[in-house]
Structures are given as C-alpha cells and as structure tokens.
C-alpha cells in the first residue's frame, strides 16, 4: 500500500508539473495508457493521480469517454477565480492589520519584493515567478487564519498556470513589482485603507491582464513559446543527448 501511494504521488507531481510547464497544453487529451509507458509504471497509480488532478481542477473529464483533458482557461474561469482571490486577500489583509504587522514581517515582504525586482532586471523569469508567489503566500499567512490560508492554497494551483504567462509578458513582471511595493508603502505609512485598496487594485489589475491574454485563447505559437521559456536548460540538454 505504501509503495502504491508513493507511485501515485510521483505520478501526480510529474503530471502536475507537465501541466504547469505547458508540456501538456490546455485542452490536450491526457491518456493513462501513454503516461504509464512514459513514467514506466502501471495504470492504477496513474489513474489515481489523474483523479486527484481532476479534483483540483487541473483536469476535466471528457463526456462519454474515459480519458481526461487538461482544463481550458476561459474568461469566466478567470473572473470567478479572481473574485475568490480578491475576497481571500482583502480579508487576509484586514486580519493581518488587526493582528498587527511587525517590522520584521514588513521587512520580509520588502526583501521578497526587492528580489522580484532583481530577478526581473536580470531576466530570471522563473526566479521572479517564485518570489511573486512567495509574496502572496506571506501576505495571506500574516492573517494567521488557517481556513483562509487553506483556501488560498487551493486556488494557488489554478493561479500558477496563469502566472506562468508572465514569461510571455515582461510588462506583467514590472507591474507586479509596482503593485507589491504600493502595498508595502501603505503598510509603512500605517494607512490601512490605502493598503486595502492597493491589494484590491493589484488583484483586479491582474484579472484584467489575464483576461486580455486568455480572452481569445492562446495561439499555438504562444503556447510553444511559453513551453520554451518554462523548460529548464537541464531538460533541453537531456533531450539533445
């Protein structure tokens, strides 16, 4: 049983990363048979992993068929997701303010934002992406509300796929740095309402950016370009051998 769980977790992590890296494109069919060959394991742990990914919203069942496909990203999906995210992050900010944001916590947020700026300027898109995620994780964690943190974790998988589009739009990286700094500056100035509005502005601005990018669906060329930027040099060198 322990071995089966280990294989399921391995399959889950591998397939999830393929979705995030756009090795598996939105709308692409996912076959447990082909995956079992690729990952060199039986179809049982593959199916369990696929079911888990379906429950997380990264895969969807095909009506009348046994296979899954990678969930598409529509304007309606983005709107719903960011409405939910706005509720989580504004409530988290309110609770964090009520709890009292310490100088050390504020310094941590500033350090993360500074690293975002550094990695953006250095053209290190993956590293920038990591610090962008970390900023929001830390901001929600300051609420000390376990249910809010859990809700944020649950939508993080969906947000991750969208945020990968910053690889295609450098302007989104610059904007994220500015929006994060606006939140930090409001906290430094002890201006709660300005900070709350900065959080709302950031979430809504991100929503509009992603709707513009996804509104008409990503072209095949855009997806291929995105896949190129999300692949690691180690992966490419291995395939060239």
Image: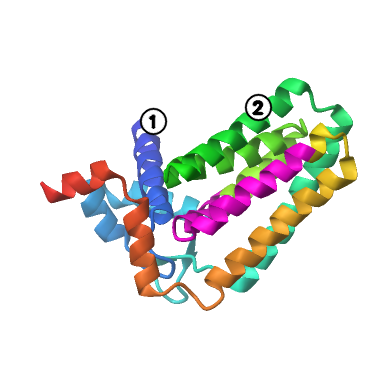
Q: Nearer the viewer, mark 1 or mark 2?
A: 2
Identify the mark nearer the N-term, 1 or 2. 1
224 is within the stretch colored magenta: no
174 is within the stretch colored magenta: yes
Q: Secondary structure at mark 2?
A: helix
Question: How far from the left and from the top, in percent, is residue 202?
Answer: 71, 53
Query: Which of these two is toward me, 10 or 176?
Result: 176
Q: CA distance from mark 1 to mark 2?
A: 39 Å
Q: Hey, which residue is sitting farthest front in the picture?
A: 121
Question: How far from the left and from the top, in percent, is residue 48?
Answer: 42, 49
Magenta residues, as a range?
Answer: 157-185
Query: Which of these two is toward me, 240 or 117?
Result: 117
Position of 120 with respect to 185 (left or right) is left
**Number of other residues with Cα within 10 Å of mark 2, as a class: few under 14, some 14 to 19, many 20 or more:** some
Residue beneath the point at 45% across and 72% down: 218
Question: How far from the left and from the top, in percent, is residue 104?
Answer: 72, 21
**Number of other residues with Cα within 10 Å of mark 1, as a class: few under 14, some 14 to 19, many 20 or more:** few
Name the residue beneath numbered marker 2. 108
Tell me if residue 22 comes above or below residue 119 in the rendering.
below
- In contact (CB < 8 Å): disc 1 and disc 2: no
Query: Which of these two is toward me, 233 or 39?
Result: 233
Q: Please identify the quadrant where the N terminus is shown.
A: top left
Residue beneath the point at 59% across and 35% down: 114
The dominant secondary structure in magenta is: helix
Q: Is residue 94 visible?
A: yes
Q: Is residue 57 visible?
A: no
Mark seen at residue 2: 1
Question: How far from the left and from the top, in percent, is residue 147?
Answer: 74, 39
Residue beneath the point at 56% across and 75% down: 215
Q: Secondary structure at mark 1?
A: helix
Query: Which of these two is toward me, 82 or 154?
Result: 82
């Amino acid at each position: 049983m322990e071995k089966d769980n280990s294989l399921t977790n391995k399959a889950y992590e591998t397939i999830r990363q393929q979705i995030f890296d756009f090795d598996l494109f939105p709308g692409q069919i996912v076959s447990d048979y082909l995956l079992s060959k690729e990952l060199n394991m039986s179809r049982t742990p593959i199916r369990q992993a696929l079911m888990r990914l379906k429950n997380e919203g990264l895969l969807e069942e095909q009506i009348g068929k046994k296979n899954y496909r990678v969930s598409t990203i529509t304007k309606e999906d983005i709107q719903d997701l960011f409405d939910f995210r706005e509720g989580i992050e504004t409530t988290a900010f309110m609770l964090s303010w009520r709890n009292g944001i310490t100088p050390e916590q504020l310094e941590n947020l500033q350090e993360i934002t500074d690293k975002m700026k550094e990695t953006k300027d250095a053209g290190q898109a993956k590293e920038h992406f990591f610090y962008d995620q970390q900023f929001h994780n830390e901001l929600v964690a300051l609420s000390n509300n376990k249910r809010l943190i859990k809700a944020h974790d649950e939508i993080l998988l969906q947000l991750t796929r969208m945020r990968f589009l910053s690889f295609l739009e450098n302007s989104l990286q610059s904007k994220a740095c500015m929006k994060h700094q606006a939140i930090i500056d409001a906290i430094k100035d002890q201006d709660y309402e300005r900070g709350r509005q900065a959080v709302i502005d950031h979430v809504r601005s991100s929503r509009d950016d992603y709707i513009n990018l996804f509104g008409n669906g990503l072209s095949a060329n855009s997806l291929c370009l995105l896949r190129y930027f999300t692949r690691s040099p180690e992966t490419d060198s291995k395939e060239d051998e």
